[in-house]
Image (tube, rainbow, N blue to C red):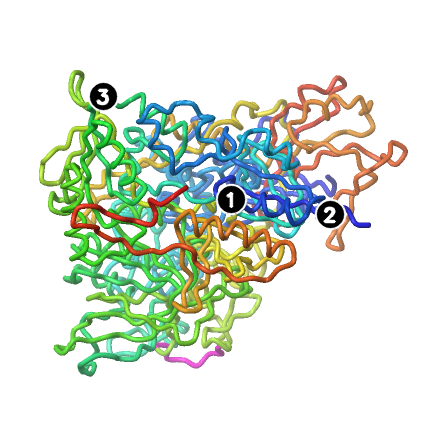
Amino acid sequence: MSAVAEPQDQEAPPSTPIMHSEDPRDVGWVVQNIPCQSACPAGTNVPAYIQAIAEGRHGEAYEINRSANVLPGVLGRICSRPCESACRHGWPGNGEPVGICNLKRSAADLKSAGHRITERLYAPTGKRVAIVGAGPAGVAAAHDLSVLGHDVTLFEREQHFGGMLRYGIPEFRLPRDILDFELHNALRLGVELRRGQAVGKGPDAVRVADLLKGHDAVLLAAGCMAPQPLSLKVRGDASEPPGGCPDVEHGLPFLMGLHRGERRSVRRRVAVVGAGFTALDCARVAARLGAHEVTIHIRTAEEYIPVTKEEIFEAKREGVRIKGLRTPVGIVLDPEGRLSGVEFVQNRLGAWRKDGRRQAIAIEGSEFVEPCETLLIAIGQKTVNDFLDIRIELDQWQNVRIGEDGMTSARGLFACGDFVTGPTTVVEAIGRGRLAAQKVDAWLMGKPRRKRVVQIVPIQEPLRERAFDFIGRQHMPTAPLHDRLGKNQLEVELGLNTGQTTQEARRCYLCNLHYQIDVDRCIYCRACIEVAPRNCIKLVQGVEVQPDGTYGSLREAREWNQVGAIWIDNNECIRCGACFRACPVNCISITRNEFVEIDTP
Amino acid sequence: MSAPRHHVIIGTGVAGNQAARTLRQREPEARISLLTLSALPFYNRYDLPRVFRGVHDWREFLVDPPAYYEQQRIGLRRCTRVVNVDAKRKVVMLEHNEELPYDTLLVASGGRAYLPEELSEYQPLLDGFGSFEQAMAMRRKLPDGGTVAILGGDMIGLDLARTLIDTGHRVALIAGKQTFWPHQETPEQRQKLLQVLERMGLDVLEADDEGGIASIEAGARGFATRRVVFGSGRECPADVVLPSFGLVPSVEFMLGSGIGIERGLLVSPTLRTTDESILAAGDVCQIWSGEERRYRFYYGWKNVRVMGELAARNLTGEDETFEPAQDETLHIEDGATIHSPFWEYA
C-alpha cells in the first residue's frame, strides 16, 4: 500500500491505524479480489455486511446495505444476484456460492423493531431538482440528492411510487408492505411527492421545458415500460379480430393491469414466451389465476436464461413447465377467433453473444404447433421517449443519449436508469440512479463532493475458521405449495431464521481480508505452504504490474534460485487463516481493504 | 512417436462401458479412464428387480468380472464425482479437487430418476430404485406382502411392479402423465393399458381424479409407514413410496463448460457436441433427428449400447451416424399382457 491519506470522516478507536489509499494497486486489489462487490451494480460492500450478520449485528448490516442501495429488504427478495454468480465460494472446487441475497433479506428481516436508520446529511444547498419517474432509479437518485442537501420533487405518472417494483413484480415475490416501508424511508427526507402527475406532452402533463425553468436540474428516470412487440402470423380458420385476439396479451401490461387492481383472467392452457423474470412472473401468476397447464417457451435452453435457479425451481414446483429451443412464429385461431395454439419453429443453439447469452438459430422447415388458449408475450421491454416535449439527442437504439457528466443534450436535463440503457435489472437501475445523483450534484455544486478510496484497517487475527468452509448453503424456506395457488399476495419465500442466517453468513470467505507475507521477515520455512488447504501460497519470481498500475498475474518460480518472494495468491485464498496461525515468525499480516466514500477537500 | 491418447469416459452404464470396450479394441495403446460415482463396477440395472427374488449378492449383477478392467487396462475409478469440465483446458475437475486431463471426453453419465419439483419436499419419505444400494434398501424396508406405492409409473417402475406382484407384494400405482414414459400413448391406449395393469394385479389410482397428490406423510406407529394423501382427502397407505417419473439427464457438471445443453447434452447424429473433443452417448444426450427436425432422446438399452459403440468409433477416426436400434411402440398382447421393448434386455 502507498499514497496514504488521512481519514476524514470515519470514526475509529484512536489506537486503530486506519489508512485511506488511492493507489491503483490498492484500488485494483479491491476490484479484483472482492468479486461480489465488483459484480454488484450498486457497489454493495457485501463482505462487510455479511460479517456484521455473522456477528449478530443485523441492524448494522442493514445500514451497510442501505448506504449502497436504499431498498435492502426489497432487493433481498427480488435481486437478480449478479454477486452470487461472481462469488468465490461458487468457483470450481469451492462448492455453492454464498446466499448473499438471502442474507441481505435477513439483515432487513432480523434487525430490531426499534432500528433507526442512519443518514449522513449535508447542509441544505438551496438547489431544486425535479426527478421524473419513481421507479428504482428515480427513488435512489431522489434519496441521494436529498441527503446531499438538495430540494427534490419526484413526479410519478402512476398513483403509487415504485415503478416496475410495484407494477411489474407480483406480490408473492415482493410484499407491498415491505416495498412501502422502504420507499417511505428512502423519500422521507423532504422529497416532495407528486403522484398521478404525468410529465411531457398531454393535456394534464407538466412540461419538461417548464420543469427546467423551475428547477436547477431535471433528471429523467422514466424507466422502460413499453413491451417489445412480437410479430406473429395468424393461422387457422378465422382471421384475427379487430383489436387483436383477446387471448393474446403482452406480459408487462398483463402484470401492470393486475397490480393496478384491474381484473385479469387466463384460460385453461397458458403459454408464455420469453425468458426473463417477467416471463416467469407471468407464468406463476397464471398458475395462481387458475390455469391448469402453464408452459414457458424459450428460444435457447433453461441453462442460459437470465433468472435465478431458485425462481425456476419454485415456478416448476407450482406446475410451470419450461420448453426450450423454440421461437414463436404464429398463432392459431379457432373459427370463433379464439386462440387454439401457438406455432413455433425449432431452434438449435448457436454461438455465444457478446452479452454472455447463447444465440438461437431457427431450423428451416421445423414449424410445429403447441395447443394453448392464452398467450402471454414477455420478450422484453423498450423505452418510450415520445412523451418528451423537448428535442434531445437519441442514440442508435432511440434511447436518450447522455454524456460523461450524465447530462442529455439539453442543459440541466439529466437522464438515468433503464430510460437510458434499455431494460436492465432493479439493482442496476438503483446503481445508475445513485451514479446520476452524484453527477447531478457535481454539476450543481461545481465539483464532485464525494470520492471513493480504499480504506485499510489492520485486523489482529483471522475472522474465519476452517470449519466454516464445510457448512452447506442454507436453503430458503418456502410457503407450502397448497397454500400458494389462488393467493397472489402470499409471499412464497419465508426468509431464513436467525440460526440459518448465522450459518450462511459464516460461509462467506470475507474476501475483503487481505493476507500478506512480509518478505523481509519471512524465513522461508514453508510452514504456511504445508498447512494451506489449497495452492494459495506460492513461491514467485515476481508479480506483473499492469499498465493501469494494478497487480497482474504471478510469475511462479520453478527453481529455488529463482524465488524472489513468497506470495499469497488472493485469487486462491479462502481466508481460512491457517497460514497466519502456522507462521512461526508472525510475518503474515491481515488487513481489511474496502471501498469507502469520503468528502473531497 | 506421439504419446497414446487419454480417453476419459464419465459414466459406467451401458453406453460408457460399451464405449470403453470398443475403444480398447480400436486403440490398444490408449489410456482409458472410466469414472463413476458408483461403488460398483458396471452392473445390469435392468436386473435389479431380482433382489426381490432372493438375489442379494452384488457380484450376481456384474456384467464383467472385476478383473476385466485390469485385463483390459481400463482405469476404473469408482466413487468419483465429476464437478466440472473445463473444455478449454481439456480438464475434468473431480470433487476432491483433482484435475484429470483428457484428449477426448465421452460423457455417458446417463440419467437419474426425475422427481417433480412439487414433490421435492417429500424426498426424505421417498425411496429410489436406481442403484443396487437403493434396491437393497427397499428390499430391507419392504415386509413380505407389503405395499409399494409407485408414483407416476414409467416403464422402469412398471417393470419393478411386475416383479413385486409376482413375489407376493401389493402395488398401488398412482398414475399420472408419465405412467408409460418414455412411450407416447394416446388417451385411448392409456385407458386400455391401465386396465391391463389392473388385471395384472396393480391397484390403479388416477392422481388427477383424486385432486392430485396433496402430501406424503409418515404413518403412525403400528400402521403403514407412509401415506400418500390426495387432494380429495383419500389416502393410500404404503410401506414404501417410489417416485417413478422417468429420467432426467445428469448434466449438472457440464454447466459452464460451453457445451450446448437443453435438457440433455445436444449432439449431432455423430454424437459430437459443439466441442470437437467431447462426445456424448446414452440417456444424457439429445440427438438431432433430421427426420423429425428436433433434438430428441432415444431410450432403451439397445439404443444406448449402439450409442456407446458409435461414440468410441467416432472418437477413433470414424464419422458414422446414429441409427436407432430399438422399436419404441408399446403393445398389448391378447388383451392381457403389456409388451414394451424397454423390458427386453439381455
In the rendering, at what x and y percent does residue A145 appear?
Answer: 44, 55
Q: Are marks 2 and 3 in contact (CB under 8 Å)?
A: no
Q: Chain of mark 1?
A: B
Asked if badges 1 and 3 are on one and the same chain, I answer: yes
Residue at 31 percent of width and 35 percent of height: A477
Residue B144 has which mark?
Answer: 3
Q: Amino acid at mark 1?
A: Phe
Give neighbour class at mark 1: few <14, some 14-19, many 20+ (Cα, 10 Å).
some
Give neighbour class at mark 3: few <14, some 14-19, many 20+ (Cα, 10 Å).
few
- Residue indicated by mark 1: B253
Mark 2–mark 3 distance (CA, rounded to whole Å):
68 Å
Q: Are marks 1 and 3 in contact (CB under 8 Å)?
A: no
Q: Quadrant of the N terminus of chain A?
A: top right
- In the image, is residue B321 above or below residue B94? below
Secondary structure beneath dot 2 equals strand
Residue at 58 percent of width and 26 percent of height: A13
- Residue indicated by mark 2: A552
A47 or B83, nearer to the observer: B83
Query: Which is closer to the viewer, label 1 or label 3?
Result: 3
B306 or A560, nearer to the observer: B306
B155 or A312, nearer to the observer: B155
In the rendering, at what x and y percent does residue B21 appear?
Answer: 58, 43
Q: Is residue A374 left or right of residue A348?
A: left
Residue A144 seen by the camera? no
Residue B8 seen by the camera? yes
Q: Amino acid at mark 2?
A: Gly
Range of magenta residues: A387-394
